[in-house]
Amino acid sequence: MSKAVVWARTRGRVALGRPRRSLAPLAVVTVAAMVFAVLLILVRLRWPPLESADHGAAARINHLIAGDRTLVTVVKAVTWLGSDGVLWTVIGAAAIGLALRRRWRLAIYMLVTGAGALVLDPVLKSLAGRLRPMVAHPIAHGTGNSFPSGHSLGSIVCYGAVLLVFLPAARGRWRPAFTTVTVTLIVLIGISRVLLGVHYLSDVVGAWAIGITWLGVTAFAFELTRRSAGQPVTDPVREGLEPEARADLRPAEREPGARHERRRQDGRTAAGIAVAWVLILGIIVGVGELVTRHGNGNVLGDRTVPHWLASHRTPGLTRWSLILTAAGGTQAILIVSLATCVVFLAVTRRWRPVIYIATLLAGQLGAFLVAEAVVRRPRPAVTHLDHHLPTSAYPSGHEAATCCLYIAVAILVIGHARGWWRWLSLIPAIAMPVLVALSRIYRGEHHPTDVLGSLLFSALWLAAATALIKPNADTSRPSGKRPRPMPLRGVPVPDRKYP
């Protein structure tokens, strides 16, 4: 190769300041925009061939799962992952984690991208004006117009944004696995909407098309902000939006120590957790059997207290009891626990707080399911304000979950924070269990001893999990060594050894 050719290529690279990028992403976004525009026009004009194909496909696909309860349950669980509550929880958690890692631009990107999908869905549905499908075996019911599918649009935008933001944190074999799982989830959510009979196939395809278009537009806008800041621009589909943020996007750091020693310690901890859970479950089931079979059903006012509260119900108290019982419900517990895990994972860069919360809630759920199946205690003999609940009243799942979660949050905050405000975490740790317990008894769903059984389980389970997992342990450095002081800006710290 001649020197002139080498010089010309070198000069070209310097002038461009970055390697030549592929035009494939631009082509995909352009094609997606065209597909959506064509589908929108055909749907708006009610083009007969498209209408006929959509109605036929909706009837055939809906018939595949009609009558199969197990399959319907699985499909509903998949479609739940594309609901607004789940998607906004994912977006909010990701934005909080990015903000705590001081990646403000990525956090804003997550919020803006998610908000765009929230605005596009109702606007496009009103513009198309398409009614929902009418199938022979309706399994679910959707509200509003049909085109495009809101679940499909929200899922491709939300999970697609998560993929573009956190792709730099995945390296090696984890990168294609991360991409495959994300794409599979998006596809399954879209298919579930057709299986349930609430959307046509073109609704889902149109939602994917406009979702890809919106992701492309927001990624290009993010690229412009990087150019204006003088940062290099890379291919977001291959490298993510900010490849240099890999260290901050990694969920946690490895704990120090040899790998075999860590595995041995983890095995001992897991064994201790399992043994403690079995022993505590035996205690709770034994107490339940004593109360229901040998306590004549009126221990500690089990009959009188629910009747007295039921006779003093008022519209205002009933409304407040509904709010408080929802605060101890599954959805609220999951949202608070996810937010807690995201915050402590972002701040501490350790998996221990996450494992601690997950162990507590999983153990509580397992103990509740086993205890209520064994004890099988009837609900209080008063008018119940809640419906479709399990037949067994002992123990209270709402109370146990509330205690485990909010007391665990207080333990984590007090253990990691250093300001006086950390003691304020004791307020919800005390108030929430009391208020949820009162609301459950007021609504006629539990006896006082059901709540006391949950309190006993929570106290024992929290003590065992805290002692074994050690969620507040400082594993960033070996014990007994003083930390190296942080340097002031512009002032180097001498490399000296501490005794």
Image (cartoon, helix red, strand yellow):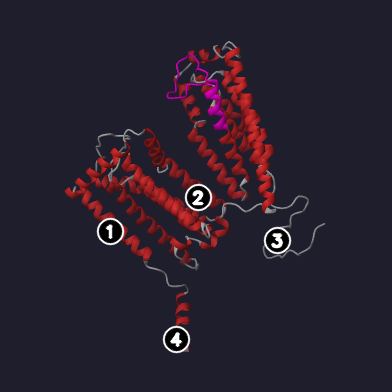
388 vs 88, nearest the viewer:
388
Q: On the picture, is 25 further left or further right than 366?
A: left
The image quarter in which residue 495 lies: bottom right
Q: CA distance from mark 1 to mark 4?
A: 41 Å
Q: Which residue is mark 4?
A: 5
* Of callouts 2 and 3, the N-terminal one: 2
Circle number at residue 95: 2
* Of callouts 1 and 4, the N-terminal one: 4
Q: CA distance from mark 1 to mark 3?
A: 55 Å
* Residue plotted at (31% across, 58% down): 32
Q: Is residue 441 visible?
A: yes
The prevailing secondary structure element of the residues shown in magenta is loop
Q: Looking at the picture, which amino acid does disc 4 mark? A: Val
Q: Is residue 392 magenta?
A: yes
Q: Position of residue 139 (x, y in %)?
A: 32, 34
Q: Secondary structure at mark 2?
A: helix
Q: Nearer the viewer, mark 2 or mark 4?
A: 4
C-beta proximity under 8 Å, tags 4 and 3: no
* Of callouts 1 and 2, the N-terminal one: 1
Q: Nearer the viewer, mark 1 or mark 4?
A: 4
Q: Is residue 47 visible?
A: no
Q: Nearer the viewer, mark 1 or mark 3?
A: 1
C-beta proximity under 8 Å, tags 1 and 2: no
Q: Label 1: how many residues lie within 10 Å, few (<14), some (14-19) or many (20+)?
A: some
Circle number at residue 4: none
